[in-house]
Amino acid sequence: MMARHDAFESSQDASQQALMSPDILQLICQFQPGLWEDMLSFLPLQGINHAFEITLAHMDDIQVVLMPWYNVYGLGRIPRLVAALPFMKFIVLAFSARVGDTQLLRALARTCKVDIVPRVGDLLTIAIDSNQVDVIASLECVGYTPEIHKKRLIDGIGDAVARGHMTMAQYLAYELNQVNLRALRASLNGNTQAKMSTNLKMIFATKNFEGLQWLLNIWTHLLPPTWMSRCRRECRLLALEHQAWHILVMLSTNDVNPAAKYDKDLILAAKLASLEAVHWLLSTAGVVVKYHHIVQAAKYFRSDNPNSSLLLERLLAMWLPTLTELESKVQCLDICMNEAVKSGHFEAVQMIWRMGASKSTLQRYGTPTTMSEFANLCVSNYGENNNLTSLHWSCDWWISIKETKE
C-alpha cells in the first residue's frame, strides 16, 4: 500500500512539473481569464484611450506608468501587452510619440496599423507638443500625410513658436508647403482663429518674441488676408497691454501708413486704460490727440480704474488747446459728452464738463454732482423714455472758445 502511495505522489510531481513548464503553462494561460501581474498597473489608463482630446497631462500619467515598465521589459514584451490589453495599442504609440522612440512606434505600427489610422492626428499633435520632429516622419507608417492632416499642422506651427520650438515650427512649415493652398484655406474655421489667438497671448505672456515675426510671415503666406488683418490688430493690442514697444515698431515697419496705425493704437490704449501705452504713443510714436480719441476714452471709461480718469484728463489737456474754432469745438465736445452720458460714465461727464466748460459756467453752476443735475442743465429727452441712457447732450452754451475772450 505504501509503495502504491509513493508511486502516486511521484506521478503527481511529474505531472505538475510538466504542466508548470513554460511552454505548456503559457498555452494553458491563453484559455484562462486574468491578466499578467506586471500589466495590472495599466488598467487605470483605459479611460485616456476614450478622451476627446489627449492632453500633456494625460501624457504625463501615461509616462509615469509605462516608462518604468518599458525600461524593465523593453520592446520584446510589447506584443504580449497589446494582445492582453488592446486599448494599450494607442497608449503605447502615444508614449512613443511623446518620448521620441521611433523604433517602438514603427514596431507597433507593423502589427496594428489599421486600428491606429483614425488616431494619427492625435499622435501628430502629441509629437508637435513634445517637440519630437523625427517622430512626424515616422508617422507616415501609420497613415500621416501633410494633405490629410493640414489643420493639425497649421495649429501646430503657432503652438511650436509659442513654446520656443523653432526647429519644429520650421519643419511644420516645410510640410505645409506640400499642401494645396486653396484646400488649406478652405479647411480653416473658427477653431483655427481661436488657436491663433491663444498662441499670440502665450507668446506675449511669456515674452518669447524670437519667432513672432517669422510666424506672422508664415501665416501671411498661408492664411486669408482678412485673417491676417485681424491677427495683426490683436498683436498690436497685446503689444500695448504687455508694453512691448519694439513689437509695435516691428509691426509698423513695412506698413504703408504707420501713423494711422499708431493713431488707432491710442484708442486701444484707452480701452486698456494703460497710462504707459498712452505715454509711449504720445511721446515716442508722436500721435496727435484728436476728438475721436476723447470719444473712445469716454466710451471705454472705467469707474473702477483710476487710470481711466488720469488717461482722459491727459488726453483732454492735450486736445482742448488745439480747438480754436467755436463750431468745431461745439461739435467735438457735444459728441464726447454725449458718449459719456449715453454710456452712463458719470466721472467722465464731470471731467469733460470741468475741463471744457467756460469759467463763467463753472462759476455759476460749479460741477454737478449727479447725472440728474446735468440732465436738468444741458440734456433734452427725445421720446417718452426718461432713462438717462436715452438722453442726448444738446447744448453749447457751457463751452468756452478761449478764456481770454470772456
Image (tube, grey):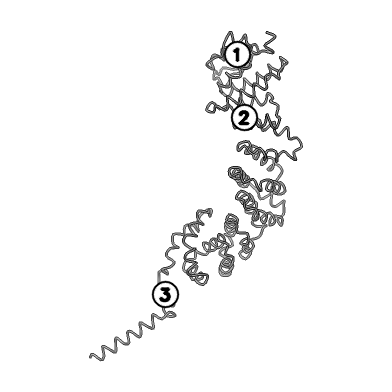
Q: Which residue is mark 3?
A: 29
Camera-side residue of 342 and 208: 208
- The crowd level at tag 3 (other Cα within 10 Å; few <14, some 14-19, many 20+) is few
Residue kind at label 3, given as amino acid type: Cys
Q: Which residue is mark 1?
A: 378
Query: Where in the figure is residue 292, as x and y percent of width and height?
Result: 67, 25
| 2 or 1: tag closer to the N-terminus | 2
Q: CA distance from mark 2 to mark 3?
A: 74 Å
Query: Where in the figure is residue 99, as x and y percent of width and height?
Result: 55, 61
Which circle, 2 or 1, is nearer the viewer?
2
| Snapshot quadrant of residue 16 | bottom left
Q: Are marks 2 and 3 in contact (CB under 8 Å)?
A: no
Q: CA distance from mark 2 to mark 1?
A: 26 Å
| 2 or 3: tag closer to the N-terminus | 3
Q: Is residue 92 above or below residue 19?
A: above
Query: Where in the figure is residue 61, as x and y percent of width and height?
Result: 48, 57
Q: Are marks 2 and 1 in contact (CB under 8 Å)?
A: no
- The crowd level at tag 1 (other Cα within 10 Å; few <14, some 14-19, many 20+) is some
| Snapshot quadrant of residue 143 | bottom right
Q: Which residue is mark 2?
A: 270
Query: Where in the figure is residue 71, as x and y percent of width and height?
Result: 49, 67
- The crowd level at tag 2 (other Cα within 10 Å; few <14, some 14-19, many 20+) is many
Camera-side residue of 379 and 366: 366
Which circle, 2 or 3, is nearer the viewer?
2
Question: Which element is circle 2 on?
Answer: helix
Residue kind at label 1, given as amino acid type: Cys
Question: Which element is circle 1 on?
Answer: helix
